[in-house]
Image (tube, rainbow, N blue to C red):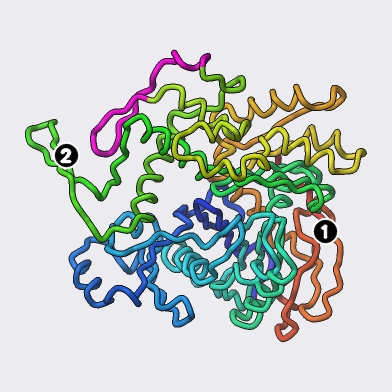
Amino acid sequence: MYGGDEVSAIVIDLGSHTCKAGYAGEDAPKAVFPSVVGAIDQMDVDETAITEKNSGSAVDSKNIVKTLDSDKAKGKRKLFVGSQSLGFRRDHMDVLSPLKDGVIADWEIADCIWDHAFRECLLVDPKEHPMLLAEPSSNTQQQRERECLLVDPKEHPMLLAEPSSNTQQQRERTAELMFEKYKVPALFLAKNAVLTSFASGRATALVVDSGGGSTTVAPVHDGYVLQKAVASSPIGGEFLTDCLLKSLESKGMMIKPRYAFKRKETRPGEYQTVDLDFPNTTESYKLYSQRVIASDIKECVCRAPDTPYDESSYSNIPMTPYELPDGQTIEIGADRFKIPDVLFNPSLAQTIPGMENFAEIAPSVRGLPQMVIESINKCDVDIRRELFSSILLAGGTASMQQLKERLEKDLLEESPQAARVKVLASGNATERRFRCGSPSLSMKNMGLLTFKENAPKMPFSPSMGLPEVWLLDPRVNHTNIFRPVKTSKPVSNI
């Protein structure tokens, strides 16, 4: 048994774009890898033929490939997890995500990702560590239960972060799996927005979480998410990447996936590009490979404009060069500012060739400043001023250049004159969410507990950085697992 601060809790944030894993108390995750997987349907492709074809690969399957066969209705699937595994092209391999609208929809894929994080990235036995999983504010109770599916800390508690929209059914499903399958002694459920707020040292704040798949605005008051005021938008990092990809293609700048060519050195310093043909490559894998390159272009050259984008104002802007993997150099001009401005003016997406499908939902999508003001106006009038002065940015897309300054500028123009607008963001997008949950699992903060089956809710002080209630397995002796302590101070500001 253990006690005190000797236990290293494990923190996992399964986002819509990347999965981050590491240890509580550290400033950065130990591993960051894509939250999508490669999947080969064994019902359509002979497994033996695939094994023979890829037998000469230099990929270390022990370290980066996780095979999971499911006999469910979906049929047998072979799943490949990790950057290196996805970077190796395979015939008939689709790229799939476990999330839909920020919530886990495919538990088999989620299980495989968590197992990869533990077994291959952290190289730990999950039975020996407590656990924290970060999830969107919209996750349901059932999803909370499943999100720690591959964690079996029999002697350690587990903390799960969840989206604000999680339902009671999803939470119950998560708890059932954690207690019955993995025999965890205690389970802890916390909202993403609450973790972000506590990580900044605030019990009340407005959390703007702009990730890969969506953008969510969630007000937090005294450590609780105000569900009635949560606003969301389908525009996230992946949507902006698709806009950039379509815009470049409309200008004749075609992005070749890395697997579609090879470069030969003809003379010292001179290379020749030779196209390769792989007819059995799926469209989803081709799109994934192109998105990886387009995402890097977006991160390198794009920045939010200081003022709303106008075609005539940015028509003569200087071009910025970018060298593609195949050696081709492209020049990017107004798109550097137009693509990020879609966050503030979603109707711009309809002007990009190839994004016509967005017109169906465009009328209902609001810009970032409008979402913030709408969310604050749905809150009690007594806390609106405090929310305006504590707007916290989280998620990878929120780290885009000049986005913080542009959002603050637009809010100053649209907010009431008495409001003191202040937008806060940490410097590193990879570390931000990881740090949000990391301090909350410190063993010296764990004291007030309830049991799994008649679990009356016991309130926590928001300054402790903890959720409301622990769920304990009554079959486990918790005497030496937790030690009640005095309330600690909030963690330091971002």
In the drawing, does residue 479 fall left or right of residue 270?
A: right
* Residue that carries the numbered disc 2 in the rendered image: 273
Q: Is residue 429 visible?
A: no
Q: Magenta span covers which residues?
A: 312-331
What residue is drawn where x is 36% and y is 66%?
65
Residue 233 figure quarter: top right
For the N terminus, the image quarter is bottom right
Using the image as rendered, state which of residue 379 and residue 451 is in the foreground. 379
Which residue is found at the position 39% from the left and 73% from the top?
Answer: 77
**Numbered tag placed on residue 486 in the rendering:** 1
Q: Is residue 149 above or below residue 57?
A: below
Q: How dense is the environment of label 1, judged by Cα within 10 Å: few (below 14), some, or many (20 and up)? A: few
* Residue 221 percent coordinates (x, y): 83, 47
Residue 60 sits in quarter: bottom left
Q: Main secondary structure of the magenta part?
A: loop
Q: Position of residue 483 (x, y in %)?
A: 76, 69
Q: Is residue 291 above or below residue 188?
A: above
Name the foreground residue: 345 vs 126.
Answer: 345
Q: Is residue 435 visible?
A: yes
Q: Is residue 328 left or right of residue 119?
A: left
Residue shown at 56% from the left, 31% from the top: 348
Marks 2 & 1, CB-CB < 8 Å contact = no
Q: How far apart in space, not on screen, are marks 2 and 1 (Cα)?
A: 65 Å
Give how far across and how far down residue 451 sits, in percent. Answer: 79, 77
Give the x, y percent position of residue 141.
70, 68
Mark 1 residue type = Lys
Where 312 sits versus 259, above or below?
above
Residue 231: image tag: none
- The kind of residue tagged 2 is Thr
- Judge from the rendering whether residue 79 lies leftward or rightward of residue 138; answer left or right: left
